[in-house]
Image (spheres, rainbow, N blue to C red):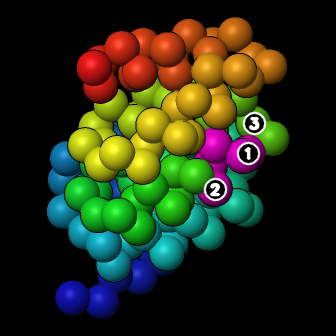
Amino acid sequence: MVVTMKQVRDELDPDEPDYMKAAKLGVEALPHLEEIVKTGDALLASKAAYLASLIPDEKSVTVLKTASESNFPEVRAAVAFGSRNITLKTIKDILNALKSDEDPGVRKQALKSIESLQ
Protein backbone atom coordinates (compact mmCIF):
# COMPACT_ATOMS: atom_id res chain seq x y z
CA MET A 1 0.00 0.00 0.00
CA VAL A 2 1.36 3.40 -0.97
CA VAL A 3 1.12 5.94 1.83
CA THR A 4 1.22 9.62 0.97
CA MET A 5 2.43 12.58 3.01
CA LYS A 6 -1.16 13.85 2.99
CA GLN A 7 -2.41 10.66 4.63
CA VAL A 8 0.26 10.94 7.32
CA ARG A 9 -0.48 14.62 7.93
CA ASP A 10 -4.21 13.92 8.11
CA GLU A 11 -3.54 11.42 10.90
CA LEU A 12 -1.25 13.79 12.82
CA ASP A 13 -3.18 17.05 12.40
CA PRO A 14 -5.82 16.52 15.14
CA ASP A 15 -4.92 17.91 18.55
CA GLU A 16 -5.08 14.36 19.88
CA PRO A 17 -4.29 11.91 17.08
CA ASP A 18 -5.54 8.35 17.19
CA TYR A 19 -2.03 6.91 17.23
CA MET A 20 -3.14 3.28 17.07
CA LYS A 21 -5.13 3.99 13.93
CA ALA A 22 -2.28 6.05 12.46
CA ALA A 23 0.23 3.27 13.18
CA LYS A 24 -1.72 1.07 10.77
CA LEU A 25 -0.21 3.16 7.97
CA GLY A 26 2.83 0.99 8.64
CA VAL A 27 6.40 1.21 7.41
CA GLU A 28 5.33 3.13 4.31
CA ALA A 29 4.69 6.12 6.57
CA LEU A 30 8.20 6.17 8.03
CA PRO A 31 9.89 8.26 5.29
CA HIS A 32 7.14 10.86 5.67
CA LEU A 33 7.48 10.81 9.44
CA GLU A 34 11.22 11.37 9.12
CA GLU A 35 10.61 14.31 6.80
CA ILE A 36 8.16 15.82 9.28
CA VAL A 37 10.67 15.34 12.10
CA LYS A 38 13.30 17.17 10.06
CA THR A 39 11.14 20.04 8.80
CA GLY A 40 7.99 20.27 10.91
CA ASP A 41 7.21 22.56 13.77
CA ALA A 42 7.77 21.26 17.30
CA LEU A 43 4.21 20.00 17.83
CA LEU A 44 3.89 18.16 14.53
CA ALA A 45 7.42 16.77 14.72
CA SER A 46 6.82 15.45 18.24
CA LYS A 47 3.65 13.70 17.06
CA ALA A 48 5.58 12.21 14.13
CA ALA A 49 8.33 10.94 16.41
CA TYR A 50 5.84 9.30 18.75
CA LEU A 51 3.97 7.72 15.86
CA ALA A 52 7.24 6.28 14.53
CA SER A 53 7.72 4.56 17.89
CA LEU A 54 4.47 2.65 17.33
CA ILE A 55 5.51 1.16 13.98
CA PRO A 56 7.41 -2.06 14.67
CA ASP A 57 10.28 -1.85 12.23
CA GLU A 58 14.01 -1.19 12.44
CA LYS A 59 13.47 1.88 10.23
CA SER A 60 11.41 3.47 13.01
CA VAL A 61 14.60 3.61 15.09
CA THR A 62 16.19 5.66 12.30
CA VAL A 63 13.34 8.16 12.54
CA LEU A 64 13.70 8.27 16.32
CA LYS A 65 17.45 8.79 16.03
CA THR A 66 16.85 11.77 13.75
CA ALA A 67 14.20 13.10 16.12
CA SER A 68 16.51 12.68 19.11
CA GLU A 69 18.79 15.27 17.52
CA SER A 70 16.02 17.86 17.09
CA ASN A 71 16.48 21.39 18.34
CA PHE A 72 13.05 21.14 19.97
CA PRO A 73 12.95 19.58 23.46
CA GLU A 74 9.34 18.53 22.81
CA VAL A 75 10.52 16.31 19.97
CA ARG A 76 13.35 14.82 22.01
CA ALA A 77 10.90 14.18 24.87
CA ALA A 78 8.54 12.40 22.45
CA VAL A 79 11.45 10.15 21.46
CA ALA A 80 12.32 9.42 25.07
CA PHE A 81 8.69 8.63 25.92
CA GLY A 82 7.95 6.74 22.71
CA SER A 83 11.05 4.58 23.10
CA ARG A 84 9.07 2.52 25.58
CA ASN A 85 7.19 1.15 22.59
CA ILE A 86 10.32 -0.14 20.87
CA THR A 87 11.55 -3.61 21.71
CA LEU A 88 14.66 -3.40 19.55
CA LYS A 89 18.01 -3.25 21.35
CA THR A 90 19.17 -0.34 19.18
CA ILE A 91 16.87 2.04 21.02
CA LYS A 92 19.12 1.91 24.09
CA ASP A 93 21.83 3.95 22.34
CA ILE A 94 19.35 6.74 21.68
CA LEU A 95 18.09 6.69 25.25
CA ASN A 96 21.61 6.72 26.66
CA ALA A 97 22.30 9.90 24.69
CA LEU A 98 19.01 11.49 25.79
CA LYS A 99 19.61 10.82 29.47
CA SER A 100 22.30 13.54 29.24
CA ASP A 101 20.05 15.98 27.36
CA GLU A 102 20.14 19.66 28.37
CA ASP A 103 16.37 19.65 28.95
CA PRO A 104 15.32 18.14 32.30
CA GLY A 105 12.02 16.85 30.89
CA VAL A 106 13.85 14.94 28.17
CA ARG A 107 16.28 13.47 30.73
CA LYS A 108 13.37 12.41 32.95
CA GLN A 109 11.54 10.63 30.12
CA ALA A 110 14.74 8.96 28.92
CA LEU A 111 15.49 7.61 32.40
CA LYS A 112 11.92 6.31 32.80
CA SER A 113 12.15 4.60 29.41
CA ILE A 114 15.49 3.02 30.30
CA GLU A 115 13.94 1.69 33.51
CA SER A 116 10.98 0.24 31.60
CA LEU A 117 13.31 -1.65 29.26
CA GLN A 118 15.01 -3.51 32.10
Task: Identify the image quadrant of residue 38.
Answer: bottom right
Span colored in magenta: 66-70
Secondary structure, mark 3, is loop
Query: What's the residue at 70%, 10% (across, down)?
Result: 104
- The label number, if any, that marks residue 66 in the structure image: 2
Q: Tell which of 83 and 114 is nearer to you.
A: 114
**Which secondary structure, mark 2?**
helix
Of the image marks 2 and 3, the number of the one nearer the N terminus: 2
Identity of the amino acid at label 3?
Phe
Q: Do callouts 2 and 1 mark residues in contact (Cβ within 8 Å)? A: yes
- The 10 Å Cα crowd at callout 1, few under 14, some 14 to 19, many 20 or more, is some
Amino acid at dot 2 = Thr
Amino acid tagged 1: Ser
Query: Do tag 1 and tag 3 residues touch (Cβ < 8 Å)?
Result: yes
Disc 3 designates what residue? 72
112 up-or-down from 65: above or below: above
Q: Is residue 12 visible?
A: no
Q: In 3D space, how far apart are the residues under numbered discs 1 and 3 (Cα atoms)?
A: 5 Å
Q: Nearer the viewer, residue 2 or 96?
A: 96
Magenta residue check for 26: no
Pointer 1: what residue?
70
Image spot of residue 114 (x, y percent): 41, 21
Give the Cα separation between the discs numbered 2 and 3. 12 Å
Residue at image point 30% right, 48% down: 88
Helix, strand or loop for disc 1: loop
